Every structure is written in structure tokens, then in C-alpha cells.
Amino acid sequence: MIYNTGIIFSWISFVLLVILFFNKKEIYTEILVRLNLFVQVFLFCLLEIGLFLNDFSISYIANYSAESTPPLYKFASLWGSLDGSILLWNLCLSFFMYLYLKSYKDLSSDIDIKIFSLIMIFFVGYTVFSSSPFAGCIELAAVGCNNSSLLPFQELVTSNIGRGPNPLLQNHPLMAIHPPMLYIGYVGMTMPFVAATSRLYSKKQNANDWIEVAEKTTYIPWLFLTIGITLGAAWSYEVLGWGGYWAWDPVENVSFIPWLLATAFLHSAKIQKSQNTLLNWNYILVGLMFLSTIFGTFVTRSGVLISVHAFSNGNIGTYLLFGMILFGIIFIVIGSKNVEYFSNSKKIDNWFGKAGFFVYNNIFLFSSALVIFIGTIFPLIYETLYDRQITIGRSYYDILVGPLLVILLGLMIFSNKLTIKNLNINKWFKENMILINSSLAISILTLLTFDNSYILVVTVAVSFMLILITVNNLFKNFRKSKINKTYWTGQIAHLGIAIFAFGIILNVSQSYSTEKEINSFEEFTFNDQTYFVYDSIEESFPEKNVIKLPISNQNTTKFTSLNIFNNSSQQAISSPAVFRTFINDVYITVKFIDENSYKLIVRNNYGIFIMWIGLFVSSISFVPRLSKNEK
Amino acid sequence: MKKNFIIVLLGIGLIVYASSIIASRNTIYYYTTSETLNIELESEERIKLGGFVVEGTIAKDGGFTNFTITDGNKDIEIIFDGFVPELFQENMGVILDGVFDNNTFLADDMLVKHDNEYVSSDGETYNVENYSE
């Protein structure tokens, strides 16, 4: 029932979009967009209903959900795997199409909705022709489903039990929120792309209006991308128990690349708006932002990460690659039709004014994105050329991206006072003398306290200067209404990044760890604190067994636990016990348990809480944008 | 216009060149299990060996973890003495650092590549530590 309805309505959505693409009458546009949104919401609910009813005749549900799965994770199973996440992707896309229609549409032409619908035809096409979460199961596996059919009204077989979601997915509620946030961020990048291409396609006299729309529509996905990446890092640190939050893993990299490009664009768009320069560069950035989100999906979904040879096995890889080429061509063709317009771009005169600094900002952000991109694809290219598998060490990113980000931090120091004219460095120094001196004092203090590298001292100095200057500026000028609100969005985001940078440099340079072998009811000392280990407790749930080990320090008891999932043969996920202070975390995980003796890994992680504060501050940078006084 | 274009292209070229050089200096090379058949190793020569953990072969032996890895053609037994990453499991891609002792490989360092079986099913968001030491 759900299977037939789902497949038929996927087709209906596809047909609606095709009609929308060829539609010539403006009055139908809104109706079609609304209908499409309605169908996508319906499909989303339908699959959720299937998940809650444990309809194991649907292949996707049999493979990625189980009867014993708790409700929250059942709900989240919808985006637990490729086919379902494309469904969520489509829902976001149809919502953004509606939002675009309502708020940003070019009233003189329908071309923007046409480009939008073309992009959506591409993604809905995948669920219709290639692989659908509603596909019915026609051949059972030992557990779950082995083969499925995309056609409606087939004879189905129903598996008795489901395979259940990936244990990693059902370990913590954060995992249910983090992927949709990232998807909204990814999918939202479609809006600036549509704005740029459509408005330059139907170019009129005031052609610069595309940048306004593109900038406005970039901010929303940028915000969600920030939140999504933050939640991913938080989940990985607070739940996963390997002690880290970022590993320069390809999967993380491809979410960071669009973020860097979008950040660059949010800056350079301002320059175009005020000084009518960087026109071509902004157009390129918008295109790269959009293509990088498809590239990200391609990298993570096509299997190229395992090996380039795995690529040919999956069809999503080829499909997405085709999409990238198709949208890339559309982008280039529309761009090349506007060469004349781009040549109107004014020259930048003041290299120490706003324009100059924003260009530097763009150079370093773009370089970071490029470096990360190369690091991500380097193993793939290497394997193609030499038929040898390699991985890129972490040091690659530390050497290249680290310094770039420190330079960016340095540039932010000047951001509160930039005008179109050149910055008067002498005057700037005089005005901020006290702040500069105090941050230098702090960095000298750091140098004396921690016997450490120059990068630590430089980062501490720069981040403190940035924090002091921004906070000072906030206190002095926030009430003044003449300053526009995007300025404060920027300042708050910068403040968050500065706090974050301070936390991360503490973390990277100061953290250390040891292993402790210990029995029940014994205590150990670490970092001048005493920790008492109790006996382990075993708890059983329908979907997992949990071994909890209580550890107490000064009347606080925390658990470090090992989660063993029934549906996974070997995989045990350990969660840490975290004793947190403002400056450091004592982070304890259990490595293995043998009767009453345990091997614990004890880490002293500095700066984590400061990092979270920083990222939180950056995430609330949208608040000034909500204010009514339009400027 | 044209001058700027050339500067941007040169800049990008420079970054690509520099990062490729640095990338190739920071690569972790590894042999697949079948490749070890064709290479000459000095005794005690440390190499990196990559493969997938064979189902049902993981066993604890005191402080050691024993298992077998394969690339589909050649199986090699591993004796691992070291930190076992949290996500270590069957069917997972691993890269081990160590030496050969006859036909067994003695390793003391492990990088885990994320689970093979779940690649299509979790994708971008859940395998946060594809390569974590």
C-alpha cells in the first residue's frame, strides 16, 4: 500500500516538475510549485508512516530500520541511508523552491523557476528511475531485503525482521539532527545558483540585482551549514569516544569546502554591492558553491573513497557526475554570454580599504578550499595514475590549512573599521593601543606558561586582539542605529571564530593522554585529581546492550559506556565520561573490559568548551539580521 | 581584465602545484595484501599493509588482537599489539604498520578506513573518522 502510493507519487512529483519546466503560463507556476511541495511533504510523511508501521515489504525499511529501533531513531532512519536521504534532499529542495518563488522571484521572467525545476527534476529523477526508498522487496536476504523493484503493483515479499539502522546512527539524538542541518545547508546553495544564472540569463539594465538575491539566499544555507558542521563535530567528540572532533576526513572536507566558498562569497558580494567590482569572481564563486555541494554528495555516496574501482559499481556516482557536468555547462554558457557585463567590473583602487581587505579574505578562503579539495581528491588521482592506494596524512592539512586560517584571523582584526578608503594604520594603532598591548601581554603570558611553538603564541595574540576589539566595539557602538545589521552579523560571527580559534589552538597544542589499567573499586590520579572507578553495570535494551562504568571525581559521577548493538556483529561504540571545566576536559573512555579489570584511556583535552562557545556565538550571528530596521 | 585573469590562474596553478608537492610528501603508502607477494622486503623492514578484516577472524589473545585481512585474493594473518580504534570491526578496511615475521604480519599501529559494509548506507554524515589513528 505504502509502496504503491510512494512510487506513484514519486512519479507524480516528477511529472509535475516536467510540466513546470515546460510551463509557459505564469498563473500555473505557483500552483505547480505548491503542488510539488505538497507531494514531497506527503512522500516524506508516507515513508515515516512506513517506518513506524514496520512495513518490511519496503526494501529500504527492511534494510535500515527494525522493530526494536526506538521511535526517535526510527524517525531519523528516513535519512539514514542514500535513498531516503535523497527523499529528504528533495523535500528541502521543494521547500526552497517555494521560498524562492515567494521571496526572491524575478517578477519579469519564469526562467529562475525553470532552472530550479530542472535541478529538481535531476534529483527526483534519481528516485524515479534509479533507486527509490519506496522500492518494494522482491527477494529476501538472510536479514532484510536483497533485491527490490521500482515498479508499482509487483508481488512483494515481506521480511520478518528489519536489519536496523547503522549503530552509529542510533547512538545519540544529535545524530538525528545533524544530517538534516547539513542537507538544508547543501540544498540551500541551489538558491544563489538559481539567482545568479537566471538573472544573468534574462539580463536587463539593472543587472546587478542578482548579487542582492544571491547574497541573501546564501546566508540561510551558510548558517545551517555552520550549525550542521558544528553538530557533527560535537557529536563526534561528545559521543563517539575517540577524543577528537575533526579528522580531515574526506567526508568532513566536502562539507567544509562549500562553507569556505560561501563564506568567501558573503564577503565579496558586499564589495560588489557597494563598489560594483569583482563581478566575474562572484559569479564563479556562486557556481563553485553549488557544484561543490554536488561534488560532496558525489564523493561520499559514490564509493570512490574506498577505491576508484568501486566507482563503477554504484550508479549514483555516474549520475551525480553527469549532473555536475550538466549544471557546470549551464553555468559556463550563461557566464560566457555575459562577458560584456563582467567587463564592467570596476578596478579596485584602495588595496588597504574595504575592497582590498575583502579581496585578501577571498584569496585565503578560496585557497583553503582549494587546498582541501586537492587533499581530498589526491588519493583518487594517485590511484588512477599509479594504481596504488594511498591516504593523505593529517600533517598535510596542518601544514597548509593551519597557517591560512591564522592569516584569515589576522585579517579579521581590521574588519570593524573598514571603509571604502584606505585604512590609516597609524591612526588605527593609536585608537586600539590599549587592546593591542593587553593582547600582547596575554600572549607573552602564554609563552611563559606553556613552553610552546610560535603558532600557539601568534594565534593566541591574534585571537585575543580580535576578541577584545570586537567586544569593545560591540559595547560602544551596538546601540547606534545608523550602522546596518549585516555589519553586526559579521562582527558577531568574527567574535565567535576568534573564541573558537583560541579554544582550538589550546586544544591542539596542550592536550595529552595516557592509558590506565585499573580494577573495580580502585582509584587513580590524573592531572592532580583523583578518580574512583566503581563496578560496571550492564543494561539491556531491545536494540542494544550497554556496559556502563561509573567513575567519580569530587562527588560527580559520570559514566563511560560501551554500546553493543544487536544488529551489528562486532561493532561496539564507546562513549566517553567527560569531566568538564571551562578550560579543560578530562575525557575517559574504556578500551577494554575483562571481568573486573579495565583498560581506560584518559585524555586531558584543553579548550573544548571554549570552542563550543565560539561556534555557538558564530551560529547566533543571524540575530541582528532579524531586526526590523531595514538598511 | 586579462591581466587579472592571468594572475588568478597563476595563483591557482601555484596553489595546486604546492599542495600536490606537499600532499605527495605526506602520503601514507600502503601495500595491498596481494602486492606483498611481488615485493622483496629486507628482514624487519617496516611497511604499511592495507586490507579488509575477514569476518569471524578477530580474536583476543592476551594483550594482542589477532585477525586476518584480505584484499579478495590474498589473506594475511595479523598479530596486532597496540591501540585498537573504537570503530574496529569485521569487514572494515584497515591500514597496519609493522613488519613481516614469515607469513604473519606483526603490527603495532592501525588506521581504520570506515566500514565497507555500510558505505552505501551511511555515507557522508556518520563515518566521521574514516581515517583516525
Image: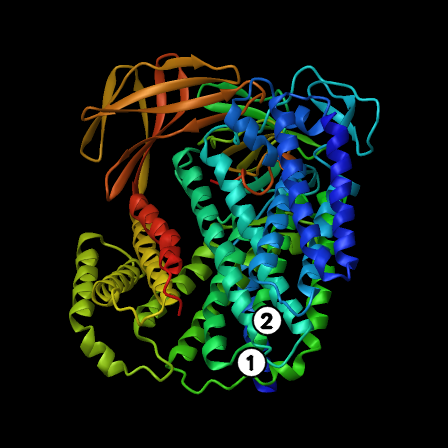
Structural crowding at the residue carrying mark 2, measured as other residues with C-alpha within 10 Å and reported as few (<14), some (14–19) or many (≥20): many
Tell me the quarter of the image containing the N terminus of chain A. top right
* Residue indicated by mark 1: B7
The relative height of residue A473 versus residue A148 in the rendered view (above or below) is below
Quadrant housing residue A514: top left
Q: On the image, which quarter does residue A618 sit in?
A: bottom left
Taking the image as shown, residue A115 lies to the left or right of residue B4, namely right
| Residue for point 26% across, 69% down | A480
Residue B25 place in picture, x, y as percent: 53, 58
Determine whether, in the image, residue B96 is placed left or right of residue A43: left
Chain under label 1? B
Q: Amino acid at mark 2?
A: Tyr
Q: Mark 2, chain letter?
A: A
Query: Mark 1: which secondary structure?
Result: helix
A451 or B89, nearer to the observer: B89
Which residue is located at x 46 percent, y 72 percent? A270
Q: What's the residue at 30%, 60% (across, down)?
A: A459
Q: Which residue is mark 2?
A: A283
A289 or B40, which is in the foreground? Answer: A289
